[in-house]
Amino acid sequence: MTDDAPLNAGTREFLTRPGLARLWTTARTRLERNALQPTGTIRLQNLDAGERETLSLLLARPITGATAVIRLPDLDTRLRTSAVGRGLAATLTVLGPPLVDRRAARDDASAERARQRTEAESALAATSLADLPWAHDWLAETHRTGTPSTVLQAIRTLAHLFPAPASWGRGDLATLTTGSAHGLDDDTPLARLVLRGIALAYDTGFPADAPGRRALWRTAGVTPDEVSSTVLTYGLRPTGATWQEAALRERSAHHLETHLTLRELRILQLSLLQDARVHVCENPRVVEAAADSARTTPLVCTSGSAATVVLTLLDTLAEAGCTFVYHGDFDWPGITLANRIMGRYDARPWRMRAEDYEYLAMRTKLRDIPALALAGPRVEADWDPELAPAMEALGVALHEEAALELLLEDLAQD
């Protein structure tokens, strides 16, 4: 019988008995470590009656104790001369899954890493980076942490930036070096690799947050995309004399919301009154309702999880002396975001305490509004230890719209 011939039904049924499962698992592990060769012995301990019986039938010798020591060469021979008709490796292959020669796989991986290192070093030597010591340090660091598949693209990218600086849009640079305008987006391995090189070139630490990464790109003459994401605002009335600030005041006077980009935030000097209090909400519906009802209180919307542009605006306002109050959803992701905003800006809760939740839950029930089940792992509210237990007890999630009437009343008083 050839190794690739199918097993007959009776033989397969016997080989797949539960009493042989540990034998095959242990033998598979040993073969994969031994270049698929049936050498050495394996020991099976704490055998039950079913395992002893099945092993005895397979090995053609009685297994009576709780431990069996099995020589793999003997097992290989027994399988070949029995109805199985093939060796141990072929038997395990036909039972599946395919065996993996882990020693060969390690050798292949090591050879591939060496090939990638040589290719990367040659590529670096052929660029404008060849005479820059930091570039060689960067490549050595890359080798130590595992050469990524993007290293050649990173070398090409850095070679466009050093040693002579030039002005690039990040999308243009990404298109030139990767073929995609999104190749250097903030969350890509290539962007992180290139930024590590830039950090070494300028002898600075790797930035921990998005604003720091954008600043590092600009240091190397690369302008990140600062116009595609926006923060929704309403009622901002900066005190400065620039036309941009005047435009914000004009929109506020006409009760119009404004979407600000990162580029605008970098250009604008948002100087508000030192005692200005800014309300922060999670859902754009609150901004829409405030505008429709001609409220005048400054309002910033996180639009969910508070992207970088939102935090950049709040940072700017905080530096200008503003204080914050915050309202969001009464669900576990909402509490997580509230913890983040309140902790970062020392914001006060705005209708976000246990009594507010209980009141809104009861009002929703009395109005016969279908309840939304609270789901996910519990999150403690840092500002009110009674809120999470109250939410868990009632089991109802309340989105921000449930409190809209109350929020608008508050906005009318400020």
Image (cartoon, rainbow, N blue to C red):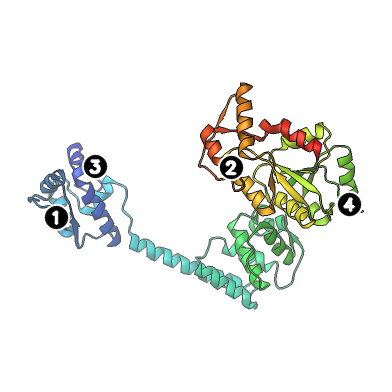
Instruction: Name the front one of labels 2 and 1.
Output: 2
In percent of the image, x 22 and y 42: which residue is there? 16
The amino acid type, in three-letter code, at marker 2 is Pro
Identify the residue under disc 4. 239
Identify the residue under disc 1. 68
Instruction: Name the front one of labels 2 and 3.
Output: 2
Q: In this view, does 188 lie to the left or right of 19?
A: right
Identify the residue under disc 2. 333
Question: Which of these two is toward me, 300 or 66?
Answer: 300
Question: Which of these two is toward me, 81 or 306?
Answer: 306
Calculate the distance from the C-alpha at mark 4 to the C-alpha at mark 2.
35 Å
The amino acid type, in three-letter code, at marker 3 is Pro
Residue 90 screen position, x and y as percent: 24, 51
Say whether residue 127 is visible: no
Identify the residue under disc 3. 6
Residue 236 screen position, x and y as percent: 83, 46
Say whether residue 159 is visible: yes
Residue 26: quadrant of the picture: bottom left
First reached walking from the N terminus: tag 2 or tag 3: 3
The amino acid type, in three-letter code, at marker 1 is Ala
Residue 216 against residue 326 in the figure, above or below = below
First reached walking from the N terminus: tag 4 or tag 2: 4
The amino acid type, in three-letter code, at marker 4 is Thr
For mark 4, give the secondary structure.
Answer: loop
Question: Which of these two is toward me, 107 or 138?
Answer: 138
Q: How crowded is mark 2: few (under 14 residues within 10 Å), some or many (20 or more)?
A: some
How many labels were placed on the picture? 4
Residue 138: quadrant of the picture: bottom right
Calculate the distance from the C-alpha at mark 3 to the C-alpha at mark 1.
29 Å
Instruction: Name the front one of labels 4 and 1.
Output: 4
